[in-house]
């Protein structure tokens, strides 16, 4: 086809005989050339939708009502013209609506689908400022601020590099009455027993994350119950291995406990 040919349906020519007139049409959107003029439209019957007494028709702008149906977007459908711009929109997707049902006993027992779930901690206050250094952070675990150089890591290093932190040269037999004397008062060492073994807690006291006062509560006695009440997950034996003083013995061994060590007995 030559480039200058018009954009119209090619006309078929009869091979023989006189040329037959074929009706033509164009795709131009010019109203004036459209097969339906404004005057034609005014004479057409109103569209079947929206209904004459419907709310949609009542709320439609008056200019649109006058121009029903519009030419360019109108589709021919038999004698009727349907304007695609004014077709009803598709129904909205059904979304779950909160509080659609009045509260009933069964509703109130159901887990809410929106908002914070129960038992998931206190609701967060999105308007509250973020915690700063000056903000008081609650400390339910009663941890204390350890002095510099007394972190758990520092203690681990001290244990690793020290041969003996027990304060005794050999393992001792310790009676309950002897243990009682090492209660940390008046500068005395802090000893405590745990599962039949006696430990010198003195070097560890300033490293205790729960504070000196707390660990001193076990001084001079069996500390297992107190210890297990607070932090059963802490490994006493590993942490205080270099602080082992000896073993607990009954009172009957008093003389031996005070004057001899376990190694002397062997
Ligand atoms: C005697 C050996 C003890 C050792 C080796 C020891 C060790 C520790 C350790 C490692 C922590 C930190 C726990 C963690 O981060 O999870 C801690 C915390 C604490 N300890 Fe001890 N502790 C001892 C005895 C005691 C005793 C006798 C008490 C109280 C009667 C006590 C009370 C606390 C408290 C209140 C905390 C802070 C709370 C916590 O961290 O859970 N501790 N201790």
Image (spheres, helix red, strand yellow):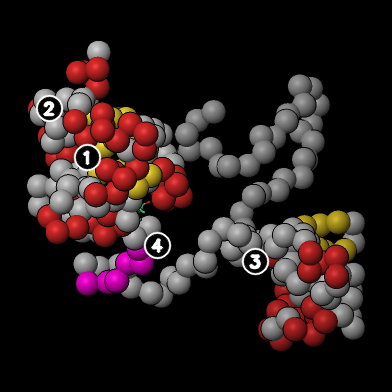
Report how far apart the C-alphas of labels 3 and 1 lie in the structure: 107 Å
Q: Which residue is drawn at 72% across and 74% down?
A: 38
> Is residue 16 visible from the viewing direction of this image?
yes
Which label sits in the foreground, 3 or 2? 2
Q: Earlier in the sequence, mark 4 or mark 3?
A: 3
Report how far apart the C-alphas of labels 1 and 2 lie in the structure: 12 Å
Left or right: 229 with respect to 83? left
Residue that carries the numbered disc 2 in the rendered image: 169
Which label sits in the foreground, 4 or 1? 1
Q: Disc 4, disc 3: CB below 8 Å?
A: no
Q: Nearer the viewer, residue 256 or 130?
A: 256
Mark 3 falls on what kind of element? loop
Q: Residue at x 75, y 84 (%)?
A: 59
Q: Disc 3, disc 2: CB below 8 Å?
A: no
Q: Earlier in the sequence, mark 3 or mark 2?
A: 3
Report how far apart the C-alphas of labels 3 and 2 lie in the structure: 116 Å
């Amino acid at each position: 086809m030559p480039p200058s040919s018009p954009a119209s349906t090619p006309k078929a020519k009869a091979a023989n005989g006189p040329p037959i007139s074929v009706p033509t049409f164009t795709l131009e959107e010019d109203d004036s050339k459209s097969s339906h003029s404004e005057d034609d439209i005014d004479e057409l019957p109103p569209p079947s939708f929206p209904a004459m007494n419907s709310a949609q028709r009542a709320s439609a702008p008056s200019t649109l009502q006058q121009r029903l149906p519009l030419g360019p977007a109108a589709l021919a459908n038999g004698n009727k013209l349907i304007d695609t711009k004014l077709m009803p929109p598709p129904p909205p997707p059904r979304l779950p609506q909160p509080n659609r049902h009045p509260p009933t006993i069964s509703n109130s027992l159901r887990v809410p689908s929106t908002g914070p779930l129960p038992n998931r901690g206190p609701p967060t206050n999105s308007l509250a400022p973020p915690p700063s250094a000056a903000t008081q952070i609650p400390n339910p675990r009663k941890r204390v601020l350890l002095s510099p150089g007394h972190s758990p890591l520092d203690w681990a290093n001290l244990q690793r590099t020290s041969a003996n932190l027990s304060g005794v040269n050999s393992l001792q037999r310790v009676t309950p009455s002897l243990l009682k004397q090492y209660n940390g008062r008046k500068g005395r060492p802090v000893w405590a027993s745990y599962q039949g073994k006696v430990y010198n807690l003195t070097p560890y006291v300033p490293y205790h994350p729960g504070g000196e006062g707390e660990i001193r509560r076990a001084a001079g006695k069996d500390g297992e119950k107190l210890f297990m009440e607070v932090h059963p997950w802490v490994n006493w034996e590993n942490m205080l291995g270099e602080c082992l003083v000896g073993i607990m013995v009954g009172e009957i061994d008093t003389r031996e406990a005070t004057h001899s060590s376990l190694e002397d007995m062997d």
